[in-house]
Image (tube, grey):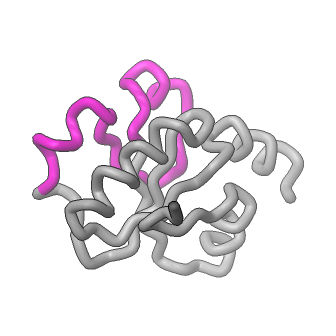
Amino acid sequence: MSKAYKEQLPREVLDRLKRNEKVYILDVREPEEWESGHIPGAKHIPLGQINRALNEIDQKQETVVVCRSGNRSGKACEYLSGLGYNVVNMPGGMTEWAGDMEYGK
């Protein structure tokens, strides 16, 4: 069964940001994870609160969904894409993002 949403690796998202593309990012990690570091400009809605915050997410705008490793963001993408949202999962999550940022790749 194919997924109803796309995926972009952290490096690809970072490249888009470096090209000054307007990238909408939704971080679905828990508050303490968010506080430990997040992508500048990202919107924070923990996974368990998404169903109560749907009005805060633009259904038509492509939104890259991130978490620590890509598991929770995948669940969020599955849920949101099922409701008609234009979402992209970032597999590898903030774990890979931190590595990409650290090495400037």
- Toward the viewer: 19 or 12? 12
The quadrant of the image that shows the C terminus is bottom right
Give the quarter of the image for residue 51: top left
Q: Which residue range is magenta in the image?
A: 28-54
Task: Please tell me which residue is depicted at 63% across the width and 49% down the height of the picture.
Answer: 91
Q: Is residue 102 magenta?
A: no
Residue 41 in view in this figure: no
- Toward the viewer: 89 or 57? 89
Task: Please tell me which residue is depicted at 51% across the width and 61% down the height of the picture.
Answer: 1
Task: Please tell me which residue is depicted at 42% across the width and 67% down the height of the picture.
Answer: 4
Where is residue 44 shown, x and y percent of the image?
A: 34, 42
Q: Is residue 33 magenta?
A: yes
- Toward the viewer: 66 or 16? 66
Please state if 61 lies on the left or on the right of 58 as rendered.
Answer: right
Q: Residue furthest top?
A: 32
Q: Is residue 89 above or below residue 51?
A: below
Where is residue 36 shown, x and y percent of the image?
A: 54, 25
Please state if 27 lies on the left or on the right of 67 as rendered.
Answer: left
Task: Please tell me which residue is depicted at 35% across the width and 71% down the height of the picture.
Answer: 86
